[in-house]
Amino acid sequence: MKGLVIKNTGSWYLVKTEDGRCIECKIKGNFRLKGIRSTNPVAVGDYVQIILNQEGTAFISEIEDRRNYIIRRASNLSKQSHIIASNLDQCMLIVTVNYPETSTTFIDRFLATAEAYRIPVKLIFNKIDAYDEDDLHYLDSLIHLYTTIGYPCFKVSATQGTGIDLLKSELCDRITLLSGHSGVGKSTLINAILPDASARTGEISAAHNKGMHTTTFSEMFALEGGGYLIDTPGIKGFGTFDMEEEEIGHYFPEIFKISAECRYGNCTHRHEPGCAVRQAVEEHYISESRYQSYLSMLEDKEEGKYRTGY
Ligand SMILES: Nc1nc2c(ncn2[C@@H]2O[C@H](COP(=O)(O)OP(=O)(O)OP(=O)(O)O)[C@@H](O)[C@H]2O)c(=O)[nH]1
Ligand SMILES: [Zn+2]
């Protein structure tokens, strides 16, 4: 029987079958991702084959190939990774320009990593009810910047309910991962979208307290109109994987586009002569903040910090 893994507690998985039942499953056999040592062989979002036993227990016997997945290293030194979720249609990054301020470096690192994973991102600017004129001006300039690069932007207020209907239509029939750093209003937004989510979130935390302190597991919430929302409690961003220096620029779409005109094919857009990217920054075709984010990722790479995520 085929099903979708909607919850992972670390010791068992909840699988929603095609006929609409939710079945608790264990895994059987040895599932390995090529090239990755993972702490969880099966992830939320996986399509699996399950086998029901006569005693009423069930196990996962097969995982279908993943369209994509995002991972996070268990720790900086560890080679083990944790698969956060798989088969995502999109990520929504929740951002606030104030209370607290989300830095453009944080946004850009998230976007670049999602590009590397080939997952489209939409930016959700929350708390628009709380901004003064300066904040709103800055908000509009960010929206202009990111929309121009190709990332759809939405303005919402989770507490006032502004923009929530449009957001719901963007979520419809898709599998969406919600992300954002602490305090941006992720829980409030989830509650505005899914009125019964708070009860279920309580349920996961209870499961966690039974000894799972180091790893947080994801869960999918079914949306009223179809589709799923994935919350990743405790995960503020996802880890980058080993990107080559020349590769980092590929994940900044506007930098990548212009880099075709650089004199050298392996240009890192720092000090090389004939660099079209640096020229574009000087002429304001590429934003200074995006370029700085790009440089900061290069620096991490040089310092061997790229495994930490952010
Ligand atoms: N003014 C205003 N405040 C909001 C809005 N959304 C959330 N908040 C407030 O921001 C604070 C943080 O909201 P949470 O939903 O707990 O934020 P979170 O992102 O889940 O934070 P963590 O639990 O730390 O991950 C709370 O005091 C919310 O009431 C909004 O749209 N406008
Ligand atoms: Zn260059």
Image (tube, helix red, strand yellow):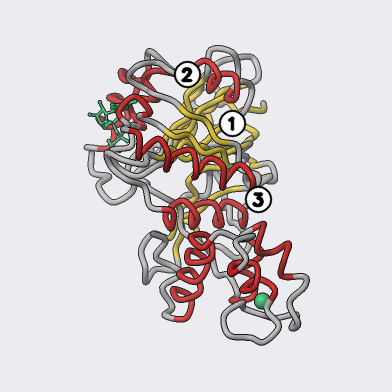
For the residue labelled by badge 3, is the local secondary structure a helix, a strand or a loop?
loop
Total label count? 3
Q: Is residue 78 above or below residue 192?
A: below
Q: Can you identify the residue that label 1 sits on?
A: 175
* Residue 275 position within the rendered picture, expressed as x and y whole percent measured from the top left: 68, 79
* Residue 229 position within the rendered picture, expressed as x and y whole percent measured from the top left: 50, 28
- The quadrant in which the C terminus is found is bottom left
Q: Amino acid at mark 3?
A: Arg
Residue drawn at the location 59% of the way across and 19% of the way down = 169
Q: Can you identify the residue that label 3 sits on?
A: 118
For the residue labelled by badge 1, is the local secondary structure a helix, a strand or a loop?
strand
Q: Could you tell me if the residues under marks 1 and 3 are in contact, i.e. CB atoms within 8 Å?
A: no
Q: Quadrant of residue 263?
A: bottom right
In-front residue for pair 75/269: 269
Mark 1 surroundings: few (<14), some (14-19) or many (≥20) residues within 10 A? many
Q: Is mark 1 within 8 Å of ligand 1?
A: no
- Looking at the image, is mark 3 or mark 2 nearer the viewer? 2
User: Which numbered dot is residue 164?
Assistant: 2
User: Which numbered dot is residue 306?
Assistant: none
